[in-house]
Amino acid sequence: MWRPQERIKWKPDVARWPSAEEAAGSTLFSPVRFGPVEARHRTWVPAMVPWRATDAGFVTPEVLDWYGRFARGKPGVLVVEATGVRDVPSGPLLRINDDRFLPGLKDLVRTVREASEGDTKLFIQIIDFLGIRRRPDPAKYFARFLKITDRHRQALEMPDATETGIRERLAPLDDDALARTLTPRELEALRYGYRERVTDTDLPQIADLPSTLPPAFAAAAWRAQEAGFDGVELHYAHAYTMASFLSATNTRADGYGGARENRARLPLEVYRAVRDAVGADFAVGARFLADECIAGGNTVEDAAWFGRAFADAGMDFLSLSRGGKFDDALQPSVGWAAYPYTGPSGYECMPQYISDERGPFGRNVHAAKTIRTTVRDSGYDAPVIVSGGIHGFDQAQSILESGAADVVALARQSLADPDWFVKVLCGDGGSVRLCEYTNYCEALDQKHKQVTCKLWDRLDLDEPDILKSIDGKRRLSAP
C-alpha cells in the first residue's frame, strides 16, 4: 500500500473515557432519525467485506457469526457488506439479485436482532461493479488475449503479416517499443489487467447500464425489505459502477457523463427506482465520496453539490468516505487483479498509522463539514455520516458538536473491539481494545482472505465452539 513520504508514526491517543452518566447524556449516544427509522445512538458500523459468503453469494454460518458479533456491541446502526445487485460472479461476497438469497438474508436479520436485543438498526449496502481481470502473464497476453488489428501491423511496419506473426513480433518488445505499438488501454491491460469502464460505451452491456441498473437496484432493495432490513445504503463510492458515473472522469456523451447534472443522472434514477420499490417506510441513503483524491477527479465542492442533490431527491442519509480509486492503484503482481486501495487515494480511504503531518485520525472530517453545511444551508436535514480513523469518545463527540457530521462511523475500531459502543456507554471505556491502524485487516482483504484483526485473531484458539479461518490458524470473531 502507498504511504506518505513523511512516514510519521502515529498512535491512537485516548486521554480519557467518559463515565456512564456522561456517555448517556452525550450527543453521541442520543437518538437520530434516518427518514422513517430512528436509531438509539449516533454510532454506526459501516460496511466491511469479510470474505465469508459462499462463492455463489449465499449467507454462511461464518457470515452470521461476523454480524452477530458486531450486534452484541449494540451500535446504533450496523451496515451489511457490499452486496451484489446483478448476477455477476464475484467470489465469496454476498449477493441479493435473486429470491434464492432471501432465506439466508432473513437468517442474518434475525441473528442481528437477537444479538443486539433489538437495539441495533440493520441496513444493507447494495452495489454494482464492472468486469475486471487479473494482470496476465505477458506471454499469454500476446499469445491469446490481445486482439490483433491493422493498427498493430502498421505500427510494426508489417502490413501483410499474419496474426500469428504479429503476436510473435510483439512478445519480445521492450517497454518503450510496446508503448509505441499498443494503445493505452492495451498497455494497461498488459500491465494491470483488463478493466471495464463506464465510458466503454462501445460495449453493449456498458452502453445499456442506464436502463439495466435502476431495476436491478430496485429489485435488490425490495428483497432487502422482504428480508426484514431497516434500510438500504446505495453504494455510490470508491471504484465501482455508480461512483464511476458520478466521477469527473466520466466523459460519456449519452447524457450520463460530462457535467455534474449528467453525472448525477443515473444515481438519481437508481434512487427513484429504489424508492418506488420500497415506499416511504424504508430508509434509503447513499455512501459516496467526499473527495475522490485523484487527479482530475471529484473534489469536495463536487461532493457538496451531489449531497444537496441527493438530499433534495429525498435520501434519508448521506454516508461519506473518500478515495479508494483504481486510477492510482499500484501495479498488481502477475496473476492478481488491481486493488483500488493501494495508491494515494486508497490511503486516503484507509489511512495507516504511518502517515503525514495530518495523521490518520479524522482525515475526512473537514470535507464532511463542508458537505453537511451545504446540505443544511439548502434547507435539508438528511443526517451526514463520517468515517475514517475515529476511535475515541471525545474525538467522536467533538465531531458531532462541531457540526461536521450527525453520526460517526467506526470501521477498523469496531473490528478491533466490537464492544466499543456498549463499553463506552457503560462507563467502561478503559477496557476498549484500541485499533492500532496497522491495516492488517486491509491486507487480508486485499488477498481475499477472511478478514480478522491482529489484536485478537490468535487469542484463545482453544475456546469452545469458536469459528476459525479456513487454515485453522485464526479465530474469526473477537473474544
Image (tube, rainbow, N blue to C red):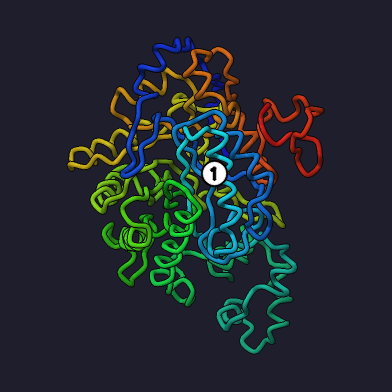
- Residue 453 at x, y = what percent? 66, 31
Q: Is residue 263 visible?
A: no
On screen, 165 above or below 459?
Answer: below
| Residue occupied by mark 1 | 343
Q: Nearer the viewer, residue 377 or 207?
A: 377
On screen, 354 above or below 471?
Answer: above
In the image, 225: left or right of 406? right
Kindly identify the residue that appears in the image at 18 percent across and 38 percent down: 377
- Residue 242 at x, y = what percent? 42, 58
On screen, 265 above or below 76?
Answer: below
Kindly identify the residue that appears in the image at 38 percent across and 55 percent down: 247
Kindly identify the residue that appears in the image at 53 percent across and 33 percent down: 116
SS under mark 1: loop
Q: Nearer the viewer, residue 48 or 422?
A: 422
Q: Amino acid at mark 1?
A: Gly
In the image, 107: left or right of 283? right
In the rendered image, the quadrant that contains the N terminus is: top right
In the image, 347: left or right of 312? right
Q: Is residue 321 visible?
A: yes
Kindly identify the residue that appears in the image at 52 percent across and 15 percent down: 429
On screen, 396 above or below 380?
Answer: above
Please count the marks in the image. 1
At label 1, counting other C-alpha atoms closer than 10 Å, the crowd grade (few under 14, some 14-19, many 20 or more) is many
In the rendered image, the quadrant that contains the C terminus is: top right
